[in-house]
Image: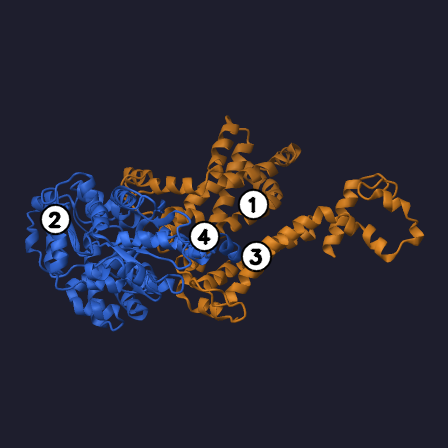
Chain colours: A blue, B orange
Amino acid sequence: MLALAGCSGGGDDGGGDGGAVELMHAWTGGDGAEAIESLENAFAEEHPDVERDFRAIGGEGNVELDATVASRLRDGNPPSVFAGWPGNNLVQYEGVLGDVEEDVWEQANLKEAHVDEVVEFCRGPDGMSAVPIGSHRMNDLFYSVEVLEQAGVDPDGIDSFDAFLDALDTIETETDAQPYVNGLATWINLQLFAVTMQGTQGVDAYMDFIEGNGDRAAVQATFENMEELLTNYLNPDAAEIGFTEANQSIMADEAGFIHQGNWAAGAYVAEELTFGEDWDRIQFPGTENMYGFHVDSFIYPSDNPTPEASKTFLRFAGSEQAHIAFNQFKGSIPTRETDTSDFSPYLTETIEDFENAEHRPPTLAHGLAVPQATQADLEDVLADSFLDPYNVESATDGFMNAI
Amino acid sequence: MKLRQLVARIRNRGDGSAGEAEKPRTDGGATATATDPRARTRFQQFRDSEFIQSAPFWLPPFLLMGFFVYGAIGWNFWISLTDYSGFGSIDYFDLSLENYREMLNDPQIWDVTQNTFVLIILFTLACLVLGLLLAILLDRKIRFGRGFRTIYLLPFSLSFIVTAQFWRWMYNFEDGIVNQTFGFLGLGQHSWLGDPGLVLFSVIFALVWQFSGYTMVIYLAALQAIPTDQYEAARADGAGTFKMYWRVIIPQLKPAMVSASVVLVLFALKAFDFLYAIWGWRPRRGADILATKMVRESFQRQEWAYGASIALFLFILSLAIITPYLYQQYRRGNL
């Protein structure tokens, strides 16, 4: 079986521009679909001679896409390029990715253009195999302006986790709205763990933890804070809904706060809600001087069906033009210098914060901080011992063992 | 040996009363009659034996089954002995029982095995009891009996993807019909697909809804095969309705019950699609079963060898359940 698939797929390695660039991504709908379409159009305009076959494979958190890509890679029948997280996420693909440092990064002068961390994130076990396309901010705390006004909560006063809990308490007593909404999926709560740890224990404690030198007390304190937030203020149907559904209750002014990567803002824009009037955000309490770092990238498999065309696409993907075309629709920001005049006020602020942030801790739940296997172990711990009922002790042990 | 007897029996049955020796052969008949029987060589004897003559009928399916089913199981077992993971190639000669040792130490395995057993037992029993009650009701010539039969059987004909979506809506915390009804009756709202103590039972309930109709049809067929004079005799001897069913009718349904339960148990072992349609890769804690764990290990974590060993464990469990049934059928001469 393996051999058969290998024969039919990866035969024309040296062939060059033999066929269309087959790009696999997970942006099936809404802002994601618009963004990839805009990117594709921009690419077609720039390189009309390169054929394209962009394919969407749906699912939250890249799960379905990763599984499909994995089986293609395993069968020796890789796509030309696939969307995925760089950083430690690349570790799992050791041996099946190609190095495009010379042909893409150097030839298109991308190293000088992109921020240093991103350049490093794109370096995996097989060399520089990825090219960034944008970054979502991971430490926003979104809220419904209406609900906070009703409750009489001043968002600018929320400067610590305790102040945040007080605000939730006020919403609970003063309004009918749910103070805090989200889904109970493991990735959502792994993200919540990361941002709570950054906010309550400091960025150094977080960096130590992801590097394997975590302080048990800091991990435990993080879980205790999460438990307090989730047991007292979370919507009761959290286990049954995803974040998009949860986000809808923010838009309907039925809930106060939600913490998500800033793709959540894409839904507000799609509903034509006004930034600052209908919805707004503060930084997750305690992370005001940080930019929670997430990167989306395109990854280049070795044994590539269209090596030259793939590299042409990747050189384009790292360009200013591509970053503007993609990010203004996706609701993410460029990881390089760009003209920001096309971006919304919210994204323009985010771009400024990105440049001025003191710390840019890499995301734990989206591939940058730890390899995929470790991330899966952490999610297992959350699923088995923390996500309702909340067993702080056992979750702390699990997290300390996993990294 | 067994296969040969089986083939011989099938041939004999097929031939019926016609004398076999005189019957013209359908295949290669001319050569068989042209040869003098006394001069037949060993090879010719072999060639003309029923075993070989019947080969065109049993050999192709035998080879296909052997390769695609038993060969695949063997291959799976072999992979489970390797340490294959990620995207490398498989080293088929570095074998150990490491994956099975790891399974013993994996706390999740115990949880999912326990969930698998609870699912099997409760689901099968509930389907058998409910199916029996429905069958008896329908057998009592009620009005619109045919209509009810179709209604009860209908869920069985739907795909799990569809029924799982139905139940997701019905179990919805805020607007689902289940919680609406509970609220109306003053029983409070429950998180049917969220509370780890409830999820497995919610799943079992939904699966019973889907499968009791199937059980009902099997019982109904068996019930309708029981002659009416037995009912009359029981009545004449003064048995009430309950006693009549309990003592006379239900004991005769045992073969139907056994075959239905084998199908139900095997289904419960593989309830993967239903869970996947509700939760995706990782079912809510409390509803994770061996099948979902196996798929997660293999296709999400790329731990192929470990996934293969879980698959083999699942296979052995199914075998353990089906073997007594096959043995019983064999003793009765049904195989």
CA gap, disc 3 to disc 4? 27 Å
Please name the amino acid that badge 4 sits on.
Answer: Leu
Q: Nearer the viewer, mark 1 or mark 3?
A: 3
Residues behind callouts 2 and 1 on a single chain: no
Q: Label 4: state its secondary structure.
A: helix
Picture disc at residue B119: 4
- Upstream in sequence: badge 3 or badge 4: 3
Residues behind callouts 1 and 4 on a single chain: yes
Please name the amino acid that badge 2 sits on.
Answer: Ile
Q: Quadrant of residue B295?
A: bottom left
Quadrant in the picture for the N terminus of chain B: bottom right
Please name the amino acid that badge 1 sits on.
Answer: Ala
Q: Nearer the viewer, mark 2 or mark 1?
A: 2
Picture disc at residue A300: none
CA gap, disc 3 to disc 2? 59 Å
Q: Nearer the viewer, mark 3 or mark 4?
A: 3
Picture disc at residue B260: 1
Chain that bears disc 1: B
x and y percent of residue B27 in the render? Answer: 80, 43
Chain that bears disc 2: A
Up-down: is B253 above or below B324? Answer: above
Q: Nearer the viewer, residue B92 or A177?
A: B92
